[in-house]
Every structure is written in structure tokens, then in C-alpha cells.
Image (cartoon, rainbow, N blue to C red):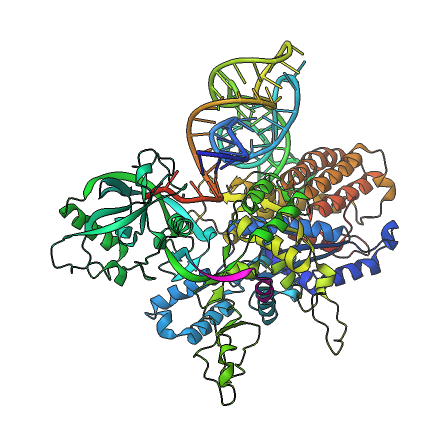
RNA sequence: GGGCAGUUAGUUCAGUGGUAGAACGGUCGCCUUACACGCGACAGGUCGUAGGUUCAAUCCCUACACUGCCCACCA
């Protein structure tokens, strides 16, 4: 009786098989290994300590939907996980999602805009309700899509970065750093996104080349060039290079210059006002650029801010958080947006003859990574994490090869970023509502001591950092929690251990009076992890920060190997983007070709390159290959009614095709271990199609002896095993139909070695 | 400005110090009892440019060009 149709049909197979896996419980590490132990014939490895393999997922955002980058990433990770599981490791792959602070908040704000509501109108509490609604509605979409991909994740351990336990871990981390003196609050010039109305870190700024005008403005006897004339109103000095012979004699002088009188209202014609401005010397000035003189606007430029700190210059803030000129800009410009103010001031300066010339100029504009608005550097009170020590820890671990990057070249990039010479303190506070609120509490309003405590007013502290809401002991007033939330990446940085129960389950926990019930601790059991893979785009944002966080909080690197996979581009080498219409939806491809074809196609292109130009011909190949295997099975099962998997004599025989098969098994294993997925996939393809099918099957057609039948069975069984990590659905489906006595799921079969 | 990667058949990519490979596509012939999502065959490349090392270079070295990415940001 033929239980096989002529062609393989992924649609009838995939959901059914995934359900079978879930019901088996074998994605849960303990059940997979205990099952294997119970059923396996005792091997030489029987007495050795159990091997573990843990891999760390890059949790997708709650705004996420599966894209090609995910498809590649999770396919490769699943390949590793499935191989390890078959090799008998106790294998954990823990799924989860990230709350994605700014990205998720922007998504919900967009939704609100459509309803004509602003988040401020709604209020923080109501807005957060909407956020949680969003999380419930869309948060798990991508996880469902991961199942379509066949990812063998332990769903009983699903985590979210805002779970109650996770929130505690984040608080613990913040308080720890604070107590160490590594977290501080400071008024500094930071990157401010006008639209998102929050500060952002250096890594969240994109510099995009744009055409602008370079204005040459007269400053007394000098002329200097700027692209932002409106910041002239915030100038507190002029700076030159200390060794610039042209200007040496003016250093330290108070220079009288003519400028526009900004105390006159706009309605009146522009008038000249004379002011004095100091000339300072600073290394940061490039004598070659423009006229070699820089106007210093400490409040609205990062470099100028640093010059001002070195030279002890005052700072004058003239632009507010909404990107408008404030009262310090004078009544003439107050309230104008920066772009309007620029136009206006240029007009005024021209009227007064203070503009020498205007050139075309191309320079880099800072834009928000999340919403593409122009970034306004602003002085702002923010929280920072000192990076010097943390970066040094990570650097040492990298140099000692406690963490390895694959391909190795990425290690250099990471080391460069972590170099104490380059690293800057991390701005970890955000003026958002969605996220982990800082465990920082302010005494508001001011303390009014209760009777008997009048003398203690000096002891009262304005601010406390703690997990619990403090109450003032002198006035009984409750403290108010900081409005700010933490940068999403602060919590993501704790992912590898916070998901495993840190800090509750770790040694770091303070002694308890009553011993808690003994429950197996995931942290003790599964930390540190072995492997993580991700896109190169978050190497600094995420991997770097996980490394130093892991070292700081657990004393161990969070993973041993980082595999940086290729970025998927269109066939023309363009970025895949939904908004540009160049994106490809993996779910459409699964619909058209089947998951296994997608997985195999992607894996066979996963070389060490940094880009992967994606075309559907790969999937055509994968689909044809899936069908080929299906039909090989049909042939083999027609030839013998029962397949004997325990063909010890066959595996050791001199038959050339068997030798080749064993060689391929070795090649595949080695290449997967080296993350040469393409090589592994292609050697399998070549062997199965061109050796097994084209040659051996053709030759076997004239044979009917037992050795031939056993050989066919051996080749098929081992091909299916080796192929399973790449094409799990197809191979499991075939396995379920094979006439093999006492079989279990292919998922937990022994890996050919 | 600094760093990294790539440049091989129509396309996407392998590859090796000594006659250049795969997949997809193309052309021709085959419904051969596992598979037409197949079988058999064919066509198609002075391996980015210019030097150098070598008996010999697509592969090693140097420079250049182009493409892409990352870091820094210069007013």
C-alpha cells in the first residue's frame, strides 16, 4: 500500500507536525533528555556528565512581524538547536519578546493620531493601558509566526521584558549600579528628538548627508562660517586653534562685535546691537576649515559643550524641547521654530550687512533612528551609566576569547567600540511612558517636618534610589517616582540572565530567614548560555551591553559564541523595507514554497558574507529538493517493506556509497559547528541528489539482494537525520511514515556521528 | 576622515598556486514502472583594473577603481 502521494505537500504537513512536536514536550529540555535516556540503548557516553546546550534568542519587538532577517536568524538558530538536541545535549532555546520602548510607544501614538487623540490628552495611566492592550493584541503575533518557521523553542519558558520578575531584575540592576557610583544624573548636552520628545543615546542617531547652506557671518574683524546662524544667539565665545598664527594674538581678548538686536520685536526693522564676546583657544578647532574660527554655542552643540567645559564658558539655552526659540533668544525670535528663526535671522543679518556670503554645502544631519526627525542637541538633566569600567571588563573578556565572534572580523569592530578611548557614558533615561520607570524617588513637595522633627529638616533627603516607594520619616509624605523610564536596551542587556530567574535564583540573593522551597533554578541550570546569533546592526546596542552586564551581575560572560549572520538584501542589493515596497514577507514564501524550502534556501546561502542578496530561485531549489527526498523515500519504501535502522554491519562496510555517506555526515557536522551553514547544506544536497539518487538508486534498480536493501535504508535514514535540522517538517513527516520498528520522533533521534 | 566586506557564467553565489564549479534561468531531446518539482545532453566566464612575487596566479603581495556596511562627525 502506498502511503505516499506523488509529491510532497507542505501545507498538509507543517501545522500537523508542529503540533506533534509540541505535544511530545521535547522542546522542553528535561523531557527531551529524560526520554532519550529512557529509550536509548546505553552507549559509551552513559556515565559521562550530561551535556548541556543553551542558546539565547534575540527577542523580537512587540511591534514586530516576521521579516526575512528573522527568517534567516531563527532558521540558523533552530538548525544549531536541533543538531545539539539530536546529539543528546540537554538543549534549551527560550522564547521571548521585548517591550521595545520608543518603537512601541511610537506605534501606539500613531494609532492614537488616527483617532485624533494625543497621548498627553489621554494621560499616562490611560496611555499605558493602551500600550498593554497593544502588547496583548500584537505582542505575540511574531511568536506565532516563529512556529510557522518550525523554531523548536521551549514555550513553557516564554518571557517578556516587562514581566513582574523582569521588572524586579531591572530595578536590582539599576540600584546596584547606583550604589557602586556608576549611575549619575547630570545636566549635559544630549541628543533630543523633538518628535519623540525624549533624549536618545548616541547609537540611536543616524547621520544623513543633506544639502544645506553655509553662511559666512561677520563677527567684528573676523568672518566665520556656520550652517546654523540661529544658534548665534546662544554663542558665548569664539574659538580658534591654539597654534593658529593668524589668531594667536586675539586669544583671551574680549572682542566687540556687531550683531542683530534681538530685543526689538519682529514688526520693527532690524537694528544693530554691539556685544562683547571672548576669544578662546581649543584643540578641537580645525584651522583648515572655513576661516579657522568657530562660534561656540555650548547649549546646542556637543562639541561646543565640551569646549565650554574645558574653557569654563557659560552656557545659554535658546532652543526648547519643542524645537522652538525660547526667551533667551530675545522677543524678536522667541517662539519661532529653529528653521523659521534661521530664515529670519539671516534676513536681518543681510539687512544689516553682516553676511559676507552664502555657499552651498553638504553635511551630515543628525536624525532620529526611530522617527527620522531632526535631532536637536539640548542641555538636559538625564541619567547616565559610566562606561569606562564596564567596557574594560567586556574588552578583557573579548581578548581572552571568553566570547568569540563569528565571523571573527566582528570582534575587531566590537573591541574598537568598547575601547576606553572611544566609549562614552550611556544616557539611560528616556522621557517616555512605556518602559521600566527609574527606581528613583523625589521628595515632592518639600519636607514640612511633623511636630518633634523640626530640627531634622537638614537630614531630609530629596531623592532616594530604591525598589520600594519611600516615605519621609520626618513628614510622613510619600515620595514621588521619577517620570522617566529606562532606555529599552538597559533591560535588554539583562536578557540572558533575567529570563532565567536572576536575581531571585542566583547566588547574589540576600540570605532569607526562611529557606524557600527547593525548586530547580533555571539560572543555576542554564546560565551562562552557549550561543546567540543576530544581525550586525545591534552589535553595540545589544551584544556589547549584554556582555558587560553579564560580567557585572553574574561574573560570567552571557554566551560563548556570537554568530553575526548576513543582512538580507533584495536581489538588486537594496535594503529590504516595507515602506519602500522592497520587502518580502517570509509567510508569503512559506505559503508558496513551504517552510522547509525557505529554510533550506536560506541556509544554503548562509556563508560568512555580510550581505545576502535574496532571490526566489533559492526557494525553487529548496522546493524541488524537498520533493526529491519525498520521492527517494517512495522508491526505498517500495523496494523494501521494512527498514532496519540498526545496520551496524552496513555502517562499517566497505561499500563506497556508505563510506561517502559517513564522510558527508562528518562534513555536515563539522561545518555546522563552524557556522558554515551553506557548506553543510550544499554538501548534503550534492550527496543526496547526485550520489544517492542519481547513481546509487539507478544502480539498485537491477538489484534485489538484502545488502542493497539495507544500504538503501541506511542512506535514507541517515540522510533524513542530517537533513532534519534544515528541513524539519518534511523529514519528520517522512519519518512518521517509514516502516521502522520502535521508532520515536526524528526530533530526538541520534545524530549520525 | 578611520575601519570592514565584496567585485568569478544571464542572475545569486561556491572555489583552488598548475585543464574554472553549483543552483536558478536558457537551448535541445526524452511521460525510462521514485520523482516532468523529473531524466539526459548542450550553450555560457581573458575570475574589477594596473603592477609585483613565482617555472606557473582567479587564488599570494601592492596600488587603484567601483559597490555596500560600520565608526567618528568638522562648525
Q: Quadrant of residue B61?
A: top right
- Answer left or right for A320 relative to A747: left
Q: Position of residue A237 (x, y in %)?
A: 31, 49
In reply to whether residue A347 is colored magenta, the answer given is no
Q: Nearer the viewer, residue A297 or A549?
A: A297
Where A686 falls versus B48 (above or below)? below
Residue A702 appears in the picture as rendered? no
Where A235 falls versus A22 (above or below)? above
Q: Quadrant of residue A187?
A: bottom left
Q: Position of residue A616 (x, y in %)?
A: 51, 42
Residue A437 appears in the picture as rendered? yes
Q: Which residues are magenta?
A: A175-187
Q: Nearer the viewer, residue B43 or A52?
A: A52
Q: Nearer the viewer, residue A279 or A408?
A: A279
Q: Position of residue B11 (x, y in %)?
A: 48, 33
- Answer left or right for B18 relative to A144: right
Q: Residue at x 46, y 72 (%)?
A: A128
Amino acid at each position: 500500500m502506498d502511503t505516499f502521494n506523488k509529491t510532497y505537500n507542505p501545507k498538509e504537513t507543517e501545522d500537523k507536525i508542529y503540533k506533534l512536536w509540541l505535544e511530545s514536550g521535547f522542546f522542553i529540555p528535561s523531557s527531551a533528555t529524560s526520554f532519550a535516556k529512557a529509550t536509548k540503548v546505553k552507549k559509551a557516553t552513559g556515565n559521562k556528565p550530561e551535556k548541556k546546550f543553551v542558546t539565547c534568542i534575540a527577542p523580537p519587538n512587540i511591534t514586530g512581524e516576521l521579516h526575512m532577517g528573522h527568517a534567516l536568524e531563527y532558521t540558523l538558530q533552530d538548525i544549531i538547536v536541533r543538531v545539539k538536541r539530536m546529539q543528546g545535549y540537554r538543549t534549551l532555546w527560550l522564547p521571548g519578546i521585548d517591550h521595545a520602548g520608543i518603537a512601541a510607544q511610537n506605534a501606539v501614538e500613531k494609532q492614537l493620531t488616527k483617532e485624533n487623540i494625543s497621548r498627553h490628552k489621554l494621560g499616562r495611566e490611560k496611555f499605558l493601558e493602551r500600550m498593554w492592550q497593544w502588547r496583548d493584541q500584537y505582542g505575540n503575533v511574531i511568536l506565532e509566526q516563529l512556529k510557522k518557521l518550525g523554531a523548536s523553542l521551549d514555550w513553557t519558558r516564554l518571557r517578556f521584558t516587562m514581566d513582574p520578575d523582569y521588572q524586579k531584575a531591572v530595578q536590582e540592576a539599576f540600584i546596584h549600579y547606583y550604589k557602586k557610583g556608576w549611575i549619575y544624573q547630570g545636566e549635559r548636552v544630549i541628543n533630543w528628538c523633538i518628535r519623540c520628545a525624549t533624549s536618545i543615546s548616541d547609537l540611536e542617531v543616524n547621520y544623513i548627508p543633506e544639502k544645506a547652506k553655509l553662511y559666512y557671518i561677520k563677527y567684528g574683524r573676523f568672518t566665520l562660517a556656520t550652517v546654523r546662524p540661529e544658534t548665534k544667539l546662544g554663542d558665548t565665545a569664539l574659538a580658534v586653534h591654539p597654534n593658529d598664527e593668524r589668531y594667536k594674538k586675539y586669544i583671551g581678548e574680549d572682542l566687540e562685535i556687531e550683531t542683530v538686536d534681538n530685543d526689538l520685536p519682529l514688526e520693527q526693522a532690524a537694528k544693530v546691537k554691539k556685544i562683547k564676546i571672548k576669544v578662546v583657544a581649543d584643540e578641537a578647532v580645525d584651522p583648515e576649515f572655513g576661516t579657522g574660527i568657530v562660534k561656540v554655542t555650548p547649549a546646542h552643540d556637543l562639541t561646543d559643550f565640551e569646549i565650554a567645559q574645558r574653557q569654563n564658558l557659560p552656557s545659554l539655552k535658546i532652543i526648547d524641547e519643542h524645537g522652538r526659540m525660547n526667551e533667551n533668544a530675545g522677543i524678536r525670535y522667541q517662539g519661532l521654530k529653529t528653521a523659521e528663526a534661521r530664515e529670519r535671522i539671516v534676513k536681518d543679518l543681510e539687512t544689516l550687512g553682516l553676511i559676507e556670503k552664502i555657499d552651498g554645502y553638504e553635511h551630515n544631519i543628525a536624525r532620529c533612528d526611530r522617527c527620522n526627525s531632526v535631532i536637536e542637541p539640548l542641555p538636559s538633566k538625564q541619567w547616565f551609566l559610566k562606561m569606562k569600567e564596564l567596557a574594560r571588563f567586556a574588552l578583557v573578556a573579548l581578548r581572552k576569547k571568553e566570547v568569540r565572534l563569528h565571523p571573527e572580523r566582528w570582534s575587531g569592530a566590537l573591541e574598537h567600540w568598547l575601547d576606553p578611548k572611544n566609549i562614552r557614558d550611556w544616557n539611560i533615561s528616556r522621557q517616555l511612558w512605556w518602559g521600566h520607570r527609574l527606581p528613583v524617588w523625589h521628595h515632592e513637595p518639600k519636607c514640612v517636618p511633623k511636630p518633634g522633627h523640626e530640627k531634622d529638616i537638614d537630614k531630609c533627603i530629596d531623592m532616594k534610589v530604591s525598589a520600594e516607594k519611600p516615605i519621609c520619616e520626618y513628614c510622613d509624605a510619600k515620595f514621588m517616582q521619577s517620570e522617566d523610564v529606562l532606555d529599552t536596551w538597559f533591560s535588554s542587556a539583562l536578557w540572558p540572565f533575567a529570563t532565567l530567574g536572576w536575581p531571585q535564583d542566583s547566588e547574589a540573593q540576600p540570605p532569607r530567614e526562611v529557606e524557600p522551597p527547593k525548586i530547580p533554578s533555571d539560572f543555576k541550570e542554564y546560565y551562562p548560555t552557549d550561543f546567540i546569533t543576530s544581525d550586525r546592526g545591534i552589535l553595540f546596542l545589544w551584544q556589547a551591553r549584554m556582555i558587560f552586564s553579564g560580567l557585572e551581575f553574574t561574573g560570567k560572560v552571557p554566551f560563548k559564541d556570537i554568530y553575526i549572520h548576513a543582512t538580507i538584501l533584495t536581489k538588486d542589493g537594496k535594503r529590504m523595507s516595507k515602506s519602500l515596497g522592497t520587502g518580502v514577507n517570509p509567510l508569503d514564501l512559506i505559503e508558496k514554497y513551504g517552510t522547509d524550502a525557505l529554510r533550506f534556501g536560506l541556509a544554503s546561502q548562509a556563508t560568512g558574507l555580510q550581505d545576502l542578496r535574496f532571490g526566489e530561485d533559492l526557494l525553487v531549489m529548496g522546493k524541488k529538493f524537498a520533493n526529491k527526498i519525498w520521492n527517494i523515500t517512495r522508491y526505498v519504501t517500495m523496494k523494501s517493506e521494512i527498514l532496519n535502522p540498526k545496520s551496524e554491519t552496513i555502517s562499517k562496510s566497505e561499500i563506497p556509497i556508505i563510506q561517502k555517506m559517513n564522510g558527508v555526515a562528518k562534513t555536515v557536522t563539522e561545518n555546522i559547528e563552524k557556522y558554515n551553514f551553506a557548506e553543510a547544506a550544499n554538501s548534503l544536497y550534492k550527496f543526496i541528489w547526485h550520489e544517492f539518487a542519481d547513481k546509487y538508486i539507478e544502480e539498485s534498480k537491477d538489484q534485489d539482494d538484502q545488502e542493497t536493501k539495507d544500504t538503501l535504508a541506511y542512506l535514507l535514514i541517515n540522510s533524513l537525520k542530517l537533513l532534519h535540522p534544515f528541513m524539519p517538517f518534511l523529514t519528520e513527516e517522512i519519518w512518521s511514515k517509514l516502516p521502522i520498528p520502535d521508532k520515536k520522533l526524528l526530533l530526538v533521534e541520534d545524530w549520525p556521528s
